[in-house]
Amino acid sequence: MARLPQSTVNHLGETGARIAMQLRRHEERVTPAKVAVLGALTRADETPPHLTARELGAATAHLGIRLDEATVYRTLTRLEALGLVHAVAMNHTTRFGLDTPPHHHAVCDRCSALQVITAAQLDTLVASACALAEFSPGCRQAVTLNGVCGACAPPA
Amino acid sequence: MARLPQSTVNHLGETGARIAMQLRRHEERVTPAKVAVLGALTRADETPPHLTARELGAATAHLGIRLDEATVYRTLTRLEALGLVHAVAMNHTTRFGLDTPPHHHAVCDRCSALQVITAAQLDTLVASACALAEFSPGCRQAVTLNGVCGACAPPA
DNA sequence: GGCTCTGATGCAAGTAGCTTGCAAAAGCAT
DNA sequence: ATGCTTTTGCAAGCTACTTGCATCAGAGCC
């Protein structure tokens, strides 16, 4: 039985252990960067969902693990390829979140706020729209709604 | 009656004249940049929809009007505010298209190809999803589908 | 516990997309 | 034509993101 990379995983307690197992299941090395990034996203998804690379750097530092921004990007690319994380392209930046199964996004065109939508009905609709366009929806976060959020409501 | 800025508008013939009228209706100055950008997008929307700022620069040059890239961006920002043009945020870049009424987008996560979807059915779905999220859909291009396009079809 | 090999990380430099300050040029009302 | 205001090109700058390279650390093996 392999020894856990204590220094890293311990910071996150049980969550850290769960993340480590998840990585091993994918035959991935358990490194501080991967554990910290996934850990930060796990915590973040509870309240304000999806972080920028920079915010993630700050979040992992806050967990006691300081990561270079280049490392954050490399780690995110890796985790995205594994299907553990997904990117949402926004104006001038990209936000990253855990790739939890069926969820979509709403992006405010004014304040860039991002919220998660979990309407199951969307899925059948998406399927038929994709069929029309000869397009295979990514099984996850297929839809991004653009509009204006409640907070930025109509000024007139 | 104001004299038309011939040097610019003439390059585009009838389309140019129509664009000029459209701008005046918005009480906007009719400048080479605005006319050329709208003209290029009008032509482009016939075949490969939505251009990057760089492509737009090339397209307007091809129409005989050379624009600095900074001008292209400034013009796009202006036209977007007028509701004549819309931006689609993509990985590492933004594409711009005419803001013609009801249309949505499908973006390929592999090759970044962008296609336009005009499924009317989507609209009712979008409405209900927005209601759930207390979100007002932009009346235009509200939905972006992410997935894999026909050309990039499953390799396995 | 120690050894080694491979992949991960930090640092620094570089690239691309986009913005901004400023002076010169052009639109358009008179 | 004249003059006020906006627009444009140029160049510099900024931010998001990537890459090369030397060092360091995870994980299998002894």
Image (cartoon, coloured by chain):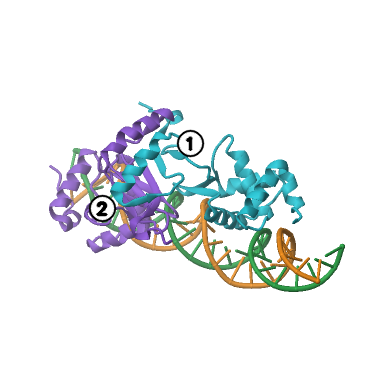
Chain colours: A cyan, B purple, C green, D orange
Residue B113 sits in which quadrant?
Answer: bottom left
Amino acid type shown at disc 2? Leu
* Rendering coords of residue B84 (x, y %): 27, 43
Above/below status of A71 relative to B146: below
Q: Residue at x 71, y 41 (%)?
A: A14
Q: Tell me whether marks 2 and 1 sit on the same chain.
A: no
Asked whether residue A56 appears in the rendered view, the answer is yes
Per the model, the C-alpha gap separating discs 2 and 1 is: 31 Å
- Name the residue tied to disc 2: B41
* Rendering coords of residue A4 (x, y %): 74, 53
Q: In the rendered structure, find residue A133 and report the number of the disc placed on it.
A: none
Asked if disc 2 and disc 1 are in contact, CB closer than 8 Å, the reply is: no
Residue B153 sits in which quadrant?
Answer: bottom left
Q: Residues within 10 Å of mark 1 (few under 14, many from 20)?
A: some
> Which chain is disc 2 placed on?
B
- The answer to which of C25 and B12 lies nearer the viewer is B12
Helix, strand or loop at disc 1? Answer: strand
Helix, strand or loop at disc 2? Answer: helix
* Rendering coords of residue B9 (x, y %): 18, 53
Above/below status of C2 relative to A106: below
- The answer to which of B119 and B33 lies nearer the viewer is B119
Above/below status of A155 relative to B89: above
Q: In the rendered structure, find residue A115 and report the number of the disc placed on it.
A: 1
From the image, state whether disc 2 or disc 1 is nearer to you. 1
